[in-house]
Amino acid sequence: MSTAVRFALHSTVLDNGLRVVVNHDPTVPVVAVNLWFDVGSRDEQPGRTGLAHLFEHLMFEGSANVASGEHLAIVQSVGGSANATTWFDRTNYFETVPTHALDLALWLEADRLASLELTQETLDNQRAVVLEEKRQRYDNVPYGDVLIHLIGLTFPEGHPYSHPTIGSMDDLAAADLDDVRAFFATHYAPGNAVLTIVGDVTVDDAVARAARYLGGVPSSLRQARPVAEPLPPLTGIPRTEVTADVPTDASYATWRLPARDTREFAAVDLALAVLGDGQTSRLHRRLVRTDLIAEGAGASTLGLIGGNSIGFAQARALAGVRAEQLEAAIIEEVNRFLADGPSAVEVDRAKAQFEREWLDQLGRFDSRADLIGCYATLYGDPEVVNRRLDEVRSLTVAEVADAARRYLQPEQRAVLSYRKESA
C-alpha cells in the first residue's frame, strides 16, 4: 500500500554550491526556511569538542547588518519564529514567517553566513552561556547526565559519537578565537549546506530569491566526511554505576544498532517500540502495571548515520526498589521477546504509531522542511520523505523478530545504573 501523502520537491544547486530544495504548498500564507549544515559534534577534533553546539549560539551574536540578539527579535516582529539546534550529525537554523517576510528570512541567513561577528567578546559571551546551559540541563537535574554515560558506554573513547553534543567544558574553556574562526571557515559554507523552503511560494520564485540573497556568499567545496565502519556488538556487558541525589534508582541498557533509516534499523526500531513505546508496550505492562516496581519504563532508538545507532531500554524505580531489580525485569522481557517474537498486532500498533508521528511532522511546514533538509543533507536525497513511510509499512513481523535477535541480545548490552544517594 502506497502512502497518499507525497510532496513535489524541486532541487537545484546554486553556483556557489548551496543546495536548495523547494516544496510549494499554498495551503496557508506561511513559508518555512530551514538551513542545514553538514556538521555536528561527530566532526569535532579531540581536545576541541563543543564547537558545533557553540556555533548554535554564536550565529545569533550579530553580523554586518544585524546587531547581537536582533535576529530573533526581527523575525518575531513580523509574526514569525526562529531557532536553531545541534546534534551529533548536523546543525540547523530555521525561521517560519508569513509569506511576505520570506525575503527578510533569507536576508538574515545570508547576512550571518557571509559576515558573522566572531570576536573575543562574542566568544566569551556565548561560552559563558553554554557553561550555564551545561549546569542547568546536565549537572543540576536528576539523571541529567544519562546520555553522556550511555554514549560513553556504547562507543569507544575517541569515536566521533563518544562525547556529547554540548562537548567538554574544559575543551570549550581552552578554545581560542583562531579555533572558532577555523571551525566556521571549514564548515559554515554554502557547499556544506542545504536550504529548504516549504510553503506559499512557487519553485521559480523561491529559487530566484535564494540565489538573490545567498548566491553571493563565497563558494566552497563540500566537506567530505570519512566513512564510518560499523562497530561490532558490545561484549562483556560494560557497566557504569552512578550514585547521586536522584529521586529513585534507575536502570538503562544500551545496544549498538545499524545506522539510521536503513531497513534493519527500521525493523529493530519497531521491535523496541513493541518493547517500550507507550502504555501498551511490554516493558510498561510488566514493570509498571504488573510488578509495580517502576514509575516508568520504555525503550527507543537514537538514530545516527556514522556506522551505528543506539538502542535503549530503561526504567525508573518506585521508592525502595533497587536498580538491579529493574535490570533483571528488563532483561527478562527482552529475552521473552527474542524467544517468542512480536505478534502481528504489536507490529501493526508500532507501525501505526510511527505513521501518526511521521504524518504529524509532515503536516507542519516547519517540521516538513526539517525532514526534507535532513535527508537532503545526510543522504543526498530529499525524496526519502516520500518513501520512508512505505518502507516502514512494508516490514514484516519476521523481519522485526530477526532484527531484534541480531541486535538486542542481552550479552550485547551495556548497563547504566543510578543509585539513590543515602540520606
Image (cartoon, grey):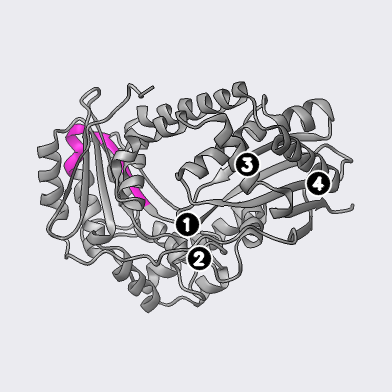
Callouts 3 and 4 close, C-beta under 8 Å: no
> Residue 84, position in %: x, y?
39, 49
Q: Nearer the viewer, mark 1 or mark 3?
A: 3
The residue that disc 1 covers is: 88
> Residue 204, position in %: x, y?
10, 38
Instruction: Give the alpha-carbon distance from disc 3 to disc 4, as whole Å.
Output: 27 Å
At label 2, the amino acid type is Pro
Q: Is residue 143 visible?
A: no
Instruction: Give the alpha-carbon distance from disc 4 to disc 1, as whole Å.
Output: 28 Å
State the mark number for residue 160. 2
What residue sits 68% from the left and 43% below the top? 313
Stretch in magenta: 92-103
User: Considering depth in this image, is 89 or 401 the residue closer to the camera?
Assistant: 401
What residue sits 47% from the left and 57% below the top? 88
Q: Residues within 10 Å of mark 2 (few under 14, many from 20)?
A: many
Q: Is residue 40 above or below residue 364?
A: below
Q: Nearer the viewer, mark 3 or mark 4?
A: 3
Which numbered disc, 3 or 4, marks the residue that appears first in the sequence?
4
User: Considering depth in this image, is 212 or 24 the residue closer to the camera?
Assistant: 24
The residue that disc 3 covers is: 404
The residue that disc 4 covers is: 249
Q: Nearer the viewer, mark 3 or mark 2?
A: 3
Callouts 2 and 1 close, C-beta under 8 Å: yes
